[in-house]
Every structure is written in structure tokens, then in C-alpha cells.
Amino acid sequence: MKKLFILFSVVLSFQITSLAQDGWFNVTPSDTVPRLLGVYALDANNIWVTGVDGTILHTIDGGLSWVSIQSNISVGLGKVQFINPDTGWVASSHYIYRTTDGGSSWVQQLYLPNSSDIITDVEFVKGLPGEQVWGYATGGLQSFWKTTDCGETWISNGGACGNGNFNACSFVDKNTGWIVGVPSVSTTASIMRTTDGGGIFEEQINPVSEPYLRDVIFIDSQRGLTVGIYGQTLFTSDGGANWEQRPNGSKTWMRVFLTASGKAWSIGFDGAIAHSNDWGYNWQNQESGVNDLLWGIHFINDNEGWVVGQISSQKGVILNTTNGGVTFVEEEKIYELPTTYSLSNNFPNPFNPTTTIKWQIPEIGFVTLKIYDVLGSEVAALVNEEKPAGEFEVEFNVGRDSSPDIASGIYFYQIKAGDFIQTKKMIFIK
């Protein structure tokens, strides 16, 4: 049964007087704000924030003042999304609520009474003009739900998505989407893709040995990023047919955001924020001023974004940037690009079964990096795509990137980038 929650009054309105500046600045309205978990910016002025104990905050002036919405929702709200100023959803681990009047009232649309059914992420996709809004939710073991009528009814189709414990979903249209998470004991599935709106999911290969993924975002049907709790950062440019690991430190990443121009941010434990200008090839740490957990992130363009989290177990924080979070120091660091081509020695060498190869290029261009045996036969193609200027590394794993039956001995790895060609030797020992 649906339940209607009416806003009886706006109890609290906070005022702040922060001025725009480089980097991230704190726009938390009060030190009494509890832990915050989700954020969604409809535009530069209209931002919604959610948190524990049913916390819903709203600003219509870009964070200069905040209103605390008294909704009678008492559960923690980890996800928020609006499709226009009036219509939006908030979600907890067992509930999804919708408003159609700008937050004045909230209707309960989904309730999961079983403790094993958990919602960790919800995403809504607008169709063509005149079409309904589709929604997708995932979370917990083998859990997936779908709505085709703005959340009025939800259909469970967990059996189609494998046996993973899924944490996040990203849909680019009503049919095409991805869910990521943690493999269960009986499966290695941590990345799943659907092209029919969740009717069938297919497993995609996660190239890292610790496939514990927390978030995923796609900006079209081909390009996406996913992050995990052991610093994993993976990028795909072909819809997930191939996922490439991008070095991004060893932080516990909880959320990631990607724009259409290739700018990206990841957030997580210890107030960590990392930023990339080039589809995740290179990352720089940004100063958040927070030492605790950051939970939610949303950008409206390459410059204007919001991050929420906590400064303690009892107090929340809201951060805003108007320049992508970049400080002058970081800006200098970002553009220190290589001036020459080079291919480094692989490490370790000899190896079994994995070794890492690093290289750099001073300008954008098509790059191939291939492994050959002593007879000149190709063993593996590790890189075969256009790359921007920068420093890169790729992992070669015998059995994953090549046949597991290759013999011990000498192999060669060769890079080609424009007119630059270089070959080096490595030794595989079984």
C-alpha cells in the first residue's frame, strides 16, 4: 500500500555566506546536520541532499541557504534523483519514495519487507517526450527491480542478473545499463550488462584480482567508469567488452562521476577526492578538508559539482566546487605532460603469472602494445586504441590476456605510437 507523507512546515532554514573560490569549499548549513549520504543537482541553483534519519535538504540558490524538509520519513536515505523541479525520488535500503510537488509531500512507492532484500542504488531514465520514466534499482544478493511507470509499480527480476552482491547501477537509456558489485561465493560476476532493460544480463570480465566494486557510471553506451574499495578504477570505451585498469591510488572509493568531456572524480574514505581530466588515464588528489567518509557526488557540468558525507559519525558535510575542485597547485601538476616517448622495463621480471608494463607518450595518438614469442608470433594485444598524452601502465596476465599454455621462456613486448617503435624483452617462468 502506498503511503503519503505530507510536509507540514519548513522547520528550519539555514543561511551561509561562502564565496566562490578555487577547489572545494564547505557549504554545510549547520554543525547540527547529521551524516549525509546522497546529493543530486538539477541545475546550478536547485540541489537536493539526503542523509540518515530521513534527512532531506534543499536549496534553490546554489547552496547559499538550505531548507530542511520535514517529510515524516525516518529511515536513512542514500539516494536522491530529480527529473524536473517537481518530480523526484529518494531511496533507503528498503524503501523508495516519490514527490511530484517539489518535496512538499512524498509517496511510498516500494517497500521491501525481507531483510535480505536491500536497495543500494536507484536510477531513473527519461524517455522521449510523451514517454514514461523508467526506473531501475539494485542491491544485495541477486537483486534487481524495474519500473516502467514512474515508480507506480516495480517488478523484481533478480534471477536475470546473476548471483553477485550488487552495489550500483547505471543506465544510459531504457534498455542499456550496467550493475556492479561483489562476487558471491559461487560466481566471479562483478560487472553485468543488459541491453533489454533488465530482461537478460551478461557478465563482463573484470580484469583485477580483487573485484569488489562500489559504483559505476556511463555517459553513453560505450564509455564508462567503475570504482572499488581497494582503489580499483576501471574504464571502458566499448560498452564493457573490455575494461582497462586505471591507476588511482589505493583509497577505498565509494562513488565516481564522469562527464561527457572525460572529466572524472572519485570519492571515498578519509575525505579522499581524486580528479581526472582524461577519462581516468591520470588522476590527481584534491583537498577536501574532510578526514571522514564521503558518500555522494554529482556534477552538472565540468566545473560545478557537489559532494556530501560526514565529518564524524554524527555530523554531515556538504562540499561545493565551481571549478572542478582544482586548486592552482593541482592545475600546474595536471599539465606536466611527458615530452618524449618511452617504454619502461616490465616489473617484475622474470614473472609468473603477472607483470606490469609502463610507457609514456607526449601527444595523443593510436597506440598498440603487443606481446610476441621468440618466433615473432603474437601472444597478446594489451593496448590497441587511441590514447591521450600521458603516462600509462598495463598489466599482462598469462591465462587472462594470453593462452594459459604458453611455455616458459623469453618473450618480447613492443609499443607502436606514431613513428615511435620500441621492443623490450621479458622472461616468463612457470
Image (cartoon, helix red, strand yellow):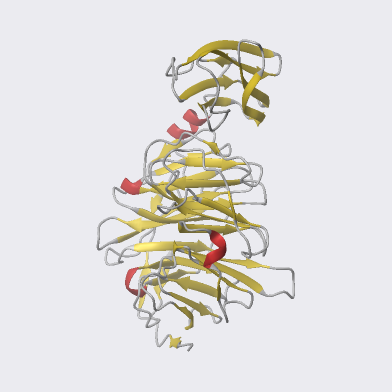
Extreme residue toward the right, this view = 129
Q: Is residue 175 above or below residue 208?
A: below
| Residue at (34% x, 78% y) in the render | 74
- Locate residue 38, reporting x and y percent: 43, 63
| Residue at (52% x, 79% y) in the render | 99
Which of the 4 quarters of the picture holds residue 54?
bottom left
- Locate residue 180, reporting x and y percent: 50, 53
- Locate residue 148, reporting x and y percent: 64, 75
The residue closer to the viewer here, 226 or 313, is 226
Q: Mark yes or no: residue 134 visible.
A: yes
Q: Is residue 398 above or below residue 167?
A: above
The residue closer to the viewer here, 378 or 281, is 378
Q: Mark yes or no: residue 324 visible.
A: no
Q: Quadrant of the C terminus?
A: top left
The residue closer to the viewer here, 314 or 354, is 354
- Locate residue 33, reporting x and y percent: 31, 66
Q: Is residue 389 above or below residue 211?
A: above
| Residue at (53% x, 26% y) in the render | 392
Report the number of numbered marks: 0
